[in-house]
Each structure stands twice: as C-alpha cells, then as structure tokens.
Image (cartoon, rainbow, N blue to C red):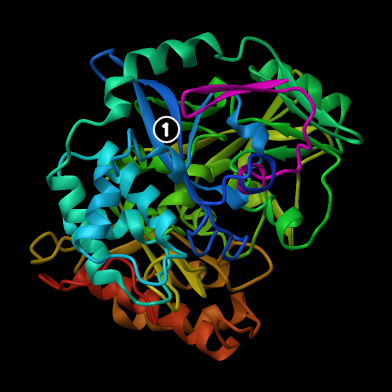
Amino acid sequence: MIQFLLNQQLRSEHALDPNMTVLEYLREHLHKSGTKEGCASGDCGACTVVVGELDISAEGREYIRYRSLNSCLTFVAALHGKQLLSVEDLKHQGQLHSVQQAMVDCHGSQCGFCTPGFVMSLFALQKNSDGADLHQAQEALSGNLCRCTGYRPILAAAEQACCQAQPDQFDAREASTIAQLKAIAPKATAELADADKRCLLPLTVADLAELYAQQPDARLLAGGTDLALEVTQFHRPLPVMIYVGNVAEMKRIDTFADRLEIGAATPLTDCYAALAAEYPDFGALLHRFASLQIRNQGTLGGNIGNASPIGDAPPLLIALGAQVLLRQGDSTRTLPLQDYFIDYRVTVRQPGEFIEKIIVPKADAAWSFKAYKLSKRLDDDISAVCAAFNVRVERQDFSAASPLATGVVVEARLAFGGMAAIPKRARAAEAALIGQPWTSATVEAACAALAADFTPLSDFRASKEYRLLSAQNLLRKYFIELTTPHVETRVTAYV
C-alpha cells in the first residue's frame, strides 16, 4: 500500500498497477483532465504537476518544498508520503489562483493546451522564489513548450505572479499539510502491486541491498526520467521495480575536506549548489541539463547508471577523477568512474549491485577545469558533443602576465560524451599534452590525436565529421580561455 495527499485529500492505494504514471492516474483513474499529455517523454511540459515534500530549512524550520515534475515520467508509486497538486487544485472558493490570474491578465494562453503545464511551473516558481527575475522565469519555464509561440506574454505573467504574489490557500494550510505529511511519512518498506507487477519501496540502504540481492532482475527506479520511457514510448511492461527515492541515505550530500560524497538518488537540482560551488562550469552545465522538471526528478546516480553515451554528467565527472561506490548486499567496492563503463549501455555492475554514492574530489587550484556542451537548442536538449577538460600545468616563467601563459603540462584529463559508445577519456590526446609545453602547437598536436581516440558516428544530432571537428575546436577554445587574458567566452555553447 502507498499513501499520499491529493491536495488535502488522503489517498491510500492498495492495488494499483505500478507501471501507471501519475498522468494516467490523474486523467484515467481520477478523471482529472486538466493535466495534458503532449509527448509522453518529458519534452513538452504539458503534463507538469507539482509535488510537495517535507523539508527542513537551514534554520531548522519544517516547510513544504514544491517541485515541478513531468507526470508522464513519474510512476504513481513515487508519490508515497508526498503531496500531489494538479491544476484543478489551484482555484479556491471560486477565485483563480494568482498565477492563473496572471496568465489571464497578460494574455498568456492561446490554444490553451499547454497552459495547465505553464501554470503549474509558474506555481512552483512562485513558491520557491521571492520575486523571480527573468532568468529564473526562463529556467523554470524552459521545460514547457508553447506551440503557439506565446512566450512573451507568459514571461510577463511570470513577472506578475512572482513579483505581486499574495498569500494563498496553500500558505494558510501549511501547518495542517505538514502534520498530514508527517502522519503518512513512510515507516517501513512499502509495496504497490497489481496482478503480475510489483514496486517495492525500501527506506534504508540495507533494505535496498537485501531486496535487490533477492530480486536482481528488478529495475531500479530513481527519478524514472529514462526508465519510464520503456512504458510510455516502447510499451514494455516492468514486472518488478525497486524505488530508491525514499532511501534518505542515498539523497544526502556530505562534504569533506577533500571530496564530496553525493548519494546516487540525489536529484540533480539538489546537486547544483555543491557542485557549482566547487566547479562553476559544472553548475553552468546543470542549468542546461534537460529541463527543470527533469532535474527535479532525475538523479546523478541515474544519469551514470543508465550508461548512455550522451549523458551530460559522466564526461565531467570522469575529467574530475570521480569515483563510484558500488554495493552488493553487505559488500561495497569503489572504482574510478572511467572504469564503470564497458560498452554501449554495458557496465561493470554485477547482478544485485547498485550505485550507492558518487565521490567527487574537491577543486584544486593547481588544476583548470572547464566543460562545454554542444546541442541544437540552448535549453532542454541532448548533447551532440559534451567535453570536459582538466589540465594541470607546472609554470616555468613566473613573470608571465597570465598564470598559465607558459609552463609544462604535468597531468591532463580530457573526457567526452557523444564521441563513442561510452563516455571516455581521450588518452592519445592526453599523451600528446603531458610533458609538453603548454602552447598552441602542443594543443594542435593533441587535437590531431583526437582522431586516434574517437571514431564518432553520424546521427540526426550531428555528423561524424562535425563531432570530431567540434571536439578539436573545444580543446582549442579551452586553451584560448586559459591563456588569453580578458577573453570572455560562454562556459557552454550551442549550435
């Protein structure tokens, strides 16, 4: 059985298909048709809902954290212990919510199909900001597509809704909602089952390890932004899933003197502050990682675990020398992330083994890290090429104007996504750099060596020639940014 709040109504589901998405649950089970299906793949945002979870502020105050999610990619079991809000819940006592009224006042709705999704994204933005600026509004709405091209009035609605926000019914009910959420907080492993399908919901790493050891063929469900596509796009049933989103130990970020330890089930949104503080380029790339709805749902461990050759996080983590802690039953092992990937969507994980945490070294001033993403759109798009460079240069001439103007390359880690069947280091290019003077001639030799490192494929995102040339140009860009004073370039680029 799972329990959650549908706005203020307690829902207890004893027998429900665990392959059912929240979108399907709302529209077909509850006959709430405000939430729309546009793509069933998390690209259009028409299905956006908001999920509330208990959280504790830095000052120790309990509050409800609201996250916008794609309901087409969220299995209903993931609602266990949370609050679900759909567009039907915003109107109160015959009055439109302020975000709905802003859409009316600013003429933000045209055909209206996408409007509920925009409204829910605006609602989450209003709840999570104190007067959002244009950049915050654009980020919050980057996962919502308007086919009528009405973005300007929608952005005006965002400004009105966030800068003229008034207390609403959710504020008035916050204390009672917190009490309800505490009352239904999961206290033991739960299960949602129907016919021949099951979803198990453990609460601890030990319980997860035991369940997975018993059922190694089960599919691990974290954010589900990739796994759910098997149901919504490929119509493949998932007989057994184990949901890891309630395992608190795997949603922590622990900071040590020399490293960050990030739980594999930590949403990408929650990873941002810690990673951006150490590596600004990592933070900049996360802003372009899919959409806010996906980042609220998708996890760092999931982005690694699905072993996609075009995942954005692995090349950056490989260039930083990150490690993964794998667990199988009571046994654990730690290995460099670069050794985790074997072949296309094939990894070293053994049956019943899972990623428990990711270990990321803290920034070292001796190294220079930068990351670049090439895609056809700035927002909500998949990389054609993702590159991450981390080089340590030992200076020879301390009178140089730029700290990296002269010197010898002592160590180099160059990692790419989209260039091979797995995210991987460019070993030949690294070898061309190490031990050589940090000059444009050395970089050109490394660029030539990239042709020995990779034989990329052509697909609808980019041709093989474009990929190789782009990879070479990104390395040149990295060198120019580090060695030319006052050069201002974007951390990430798009084509």
Determine if residue 48 is in view.
Answer: yes
399 on left or right of 468: left
The answer to which quarter of the image holds residue 440 is bottom left
**Over which residues does the magenta segment extend?**
1-26
Q: Residue furthest right?
A: 196
What is the x, y in percent for residue 24?
Answer: 67, 48
Quadrant where the image shows the N terminus: top right
Residue position for label 1 = 260
Residue located at (56% from left, 81% from top): 461
Q: Is residue 232 above or below residue 94?
A: below
Res 366 seen here: no
State the image coordinates of residue 390 (x, y, percent, origin top left): 39, 58
Tell me what residue is drawn at x 34 percent, y 42 percent: 124
> Horizontal placement of 494 versus 88: left or right?
left
- Residue 236, percent from left and from top: 83, 55
Q: Dividing the image into 4 quarters, which one contains the C terminus?
A: bottom left
In depth, the one of 281 and 297 nearer the eye is 297
Along the viewing direction, whichever of 459 and 325 lies nearer the viewer: 459
Which one is in front, 423 or 237? Answer: 237
- SS state under label 1: strand
Density class for disc 1 (Cα within 10 Å; few <14, some 14-19, many ≥20) is many
Instruction: Judge left or right: residue 210 versus residue 312.
Output: right
Question: Does the magenta portion include 21?
Answer: yes
Task: Pick whichever, 201 or 435, lies toward us.
Answer: 201
Residue 433, placed above or below residue 398: below
Residue 49 located within the stretch drawn in magenta: no
Pick out the residue farthest to the front: 94
Q: What residue is rendered at 12% in x and 44% in y? A: 164
| x, y percent for residue 384 | 52, 75
Query: What amino acid is labelled 1 in the image?
Result: Leu
Q: Residue at x 33, y 20 (%)?
A: 173
